[in-house]
Amino acid sequence: MKKAVGLLEYRSVTRGIVGADTVVKAASVELLQAATVCPGKFLVLFAGDVGSVQSAMEAGIAASEGVLIDHFLLANVHEAVFPALSATSIIEPKGALGVIETFTAAAAVVAGDIAVKTAQVDLIEIRLARGLGGKSFVTFCGDVGSVAMAVEAVAKSLAAEGTLLDKAVLPAPHREVWERLV
């Protein structure tokens, strides 16, 4: 059962690929993403039980040869985060739309987890840094009050870390907006 997520962000594509291989060989983890992200970095995202993710993380850090930009381990992740990371959430768009934009991929994963743990919202997607100049964003929906509560909780947490770029609550998005997002 996936209960933890690990993320390693490298400034070298070569070291990132080596890191991805090292991570999955080091422990019983599932590789969720191993890809280049803007601007010319490599992101390795993996999941598993907390102990396995910790072991894989340590191995990936050791393989970084000084090019590791960022890393984090998030334990006890809400189960809705996993399909949102691969844009495979099966939800019916409803009510309001919440959008959180972050400076880092790690902050977007944390934002999605905080949002679903704070209020009754459905995660739509957690988009990590691809084609975004290194930025990331999270979208979620629910009733206006729940979406506003989740946006504020996320904003407060990320602002304290300096990783929040922007936030929005759209109380009633147009049908065409929903069609493009979901």
Image: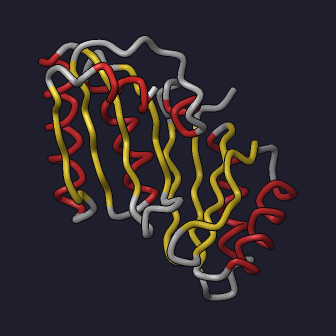
Q: In this view, does 68 lie above or below 32?
A: below
- Count of marks overlaid on the render: 0
Tell me what residue is drawn at x 27 percent, y 45 percent: 100
Residue 59 horizontal side relative to residue 159, left or right: right
Tell me what residue is drawn at x 54 percent, y 17 percent: 90
Q: Quadrant of residue 13?
A: bottom right
Image quadrant occupied by the N terminus: top right
Residue 110 horizontal side relative to residue 164, left or right: right
**Foreground of the two, 1 or 163:** 163
Residue 170 horizontal side relative to residue 18, left or right: left
**x, y percent for residue 147:** 20, 24
Q: In this view, does 163 lie above or below 1?
A: below
| Scheme by which the image is coloured | secondary structure
Q: Quadrant of residue 118?
A: top left
Tell me what residue is drawn at x 67 percent, y 51 percent: 33
Q: In this view, does 161 lie above or below 10?
A: above
Query: Extreme right residue here?
Result: 25
**Foreground of the two, 141 or 112:** 141
**x, y percent for residue 152:** 14, 37
Residue 33 horizontal side relative to residue 81, left or right: right
**x, y percent for residue 16:** 70, 72
Query: Extreme front residue here?
Result: 176
Q: Is residue 161 above or below residue 11?
A: above
**Foreground of the two, 106 or 60:** 106
**x, y percent for residue 178:** 36, 24
Tell me what residue is drawn at x 80 percent, y 73 percent: 18
